[in-house]
Amino acid sequence: MPKITVLGKSNLQEDAWHSMLISLLRGLAALQVAAAHLRAQMYPGFGTVTSPPLLFQGLVFGTGFAYLAVIVFFVLSGWLVGGSFLNKLGAEHAFQHYAVDRVSRLWVVLAPTFAVVLLAGAVLGLLDRSQLSLDAGEPYSASVFAGNLLGLQTIVVPPFGGNFPLWSLANETWYYVLFPLLVLAFPGRPGATRIAALLAIAVIARLVPAAILLYFSLWLLGVLFSRIRIEAGPVWRWGLTLLLACSALAIRMKGKGDIAPDSYLQYLLFSLVFVLFLSSMQFKRRATPMLDRLDRIGRFFANFSFTLYVAHVPMMLVIGHLLWSLFGIGQLSPYRLSDFLVYCASYLVLVAGAYWFSLPFEANTPRVRQWFKAQLLAKGRVVRASR
C-alpha cells in the first residue's frame, strides 16, 4: 500500500522525477495553448466543416486541451510559488522577497509584451490617437496598460490590446496576493496583523469575480501536495498515470470547454488526480542519457513558457497579416495538405519568435530580481542606520 509522508519543506530538488515532469508540463501547456489559438485563427471552426478529413480532425482534437493546460498552470503555480514561499517563510525579509519575486516574474515579461502588442496594433492598423488615451474602455489606453500590470483585466479593464489569454494572469496575480494574506491570517501571528489580513481578503473577495476565488482552491491544492510525498510501487504510479490521462480525455471529449463556476467540478477532480500523481513521483530519477535529454528539453521550453503564453496572440496576428500581405494566404482550408504545412510553419515561427523574445527579458528575470532585492535591502539598512 502507498505510504503518505508530510514533508517539512517542499521538495524542489531538480534531480527528482516530479521536477522533470513539472518542467515538461509547463512547456507543453504553453505549447498547447499557442497551438490551439493559432488553429482557431487560421482555420474555420470545426462545426462548420463538412466531412472534415482525418488530418484536420487530428489537429482539432490535439489542440483542444487549452483549458486543461491553464488548469495545469494554476496547479503548478501553487506547487512552485506557494511551496517555495512556505519553505522560506522563516527567513529574514521573506514577505519582501516574495513580493519582489512575484512582481518581477510578471512585469519583466508583461511590460515588453505590451510593447509587442502596441507594435502589432500599429502593423494591423488598429491604433489611433483616441485609443492611446486614458479611457479605460480603449484596449490600448494607458489606464488599460496599468490595469493589466496590476491584474485588473476582465475585472475593471479589458485585456490590453485584445490579448485575450491575459485573463488568466488576473487569476494568477490575485492568487499571488491572497496566499500570503492567508498565511498572515493563520494563528500565531499578532492579532492586529491577522485582522488586517482578513479585512484585505474580504475586500479582494468583494472585488474579484467568483470564478477567480473558486479556482484559487486548485492553486492551493498545488501548495498542499507540494508538502506530501506518496511512496508507491510502479503499479500505483502507472495506475495514477492512466487515470490522469483518462480524466484529461474525458474532459476533452465530454467536459465543458471553459473555466467557469459550472466547470469547476470536472477541473477539481482532474486536479486531484494530477497532484496525487505528482506527489507519487517525488523520488530521485536515474541519470540516463535519454532521461537527461528529456529533462533538458523540458527545461528549455519551460524557461520561455511564460513569454510564449502572453506574447503568442499579437505575434500570431502579425504572422497572419504577413501571410496575407506577402502570399495572399487568408483562412486555411482543412482539405489541403499544403495549408496544413503553412500552419505548421507558422507555429514554428511563433514558438521560435517567443524563444528569441524571451532571451533579453524572461531569461534575465533572476538578474532583475536580485538587483531589486539588493536595492530593497540596502535601503532597509540605511533606514536602520539612520535610527
Image (cartoon, rainbow, N blue to C red):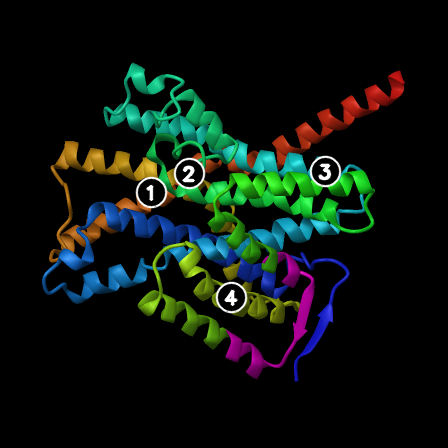
Dividing the picture into quarters, in which one does residue 54 lie? bottom left
Q: Distance of mark 3 from mark 1, alpha carbons?
A: 45 Å
C-beta proximity under 8 Å, tags 3 and 1: no
Q: Residues within 10 Å of mark 1 (few under 14, many from 20)?
A: many
Q: In the rendered image, which residue does mark 2 sit on?
A: 154
Q: Is tag 3's residue or tag 1's residue first in the polypeptide sequence?
A: 3
Q: Can residue 29 be found in the magenta stretch? A: no
Looking at the image, residue 200 sits to the left or right of residue 208; the answer is right
Closest to the observer, 360 or 154: 154
Mark 2: secondary structure: loop
Tell me: residue 80, above or below residue 304: below
383 relative to 242 in the view: left or right: right
Q: Nearer the viewer, residue 153 or 379?
A: 153
- The residue indicated by pointer 3 is 196
Q: Which numbered disc, 4 or 2, marks the residue that appears first in the sequence?
A: 2
User: Quadrant location of the C terminus?
Assistant: top right
The Cα atoms of the two marked residues, 4 and 2, are separated by 43 Å
SS at circle 4: helix
Residue ID for mark 4? 290
Q: Which mark is residue 49?
A: none
- Foreground mark, 2 or 1, reads 2
Q: Which residues are magenta?
A: 222-240
Considering depth in this image, is 229 or 216 the residue closer to the camera? 216
Q: Which-is-in-front pick, marks 4 and 1?
A: 1
Nearest to viewer (mark 4 / mark 2): 2
Question: Helix, strand or loop at disc 1?
Answer: helix
Which residue occupies 31% across, 57% down?
A: 63
Q: Say whether disc 2 or disc 1 marks the residue closer to the N-terminus.
A: 2
| Pointer 2 local density, CA inside 10 Å: few below 14, some 14–19, many at least 20 | some
Q: Which residue is mark 1?
A: 350
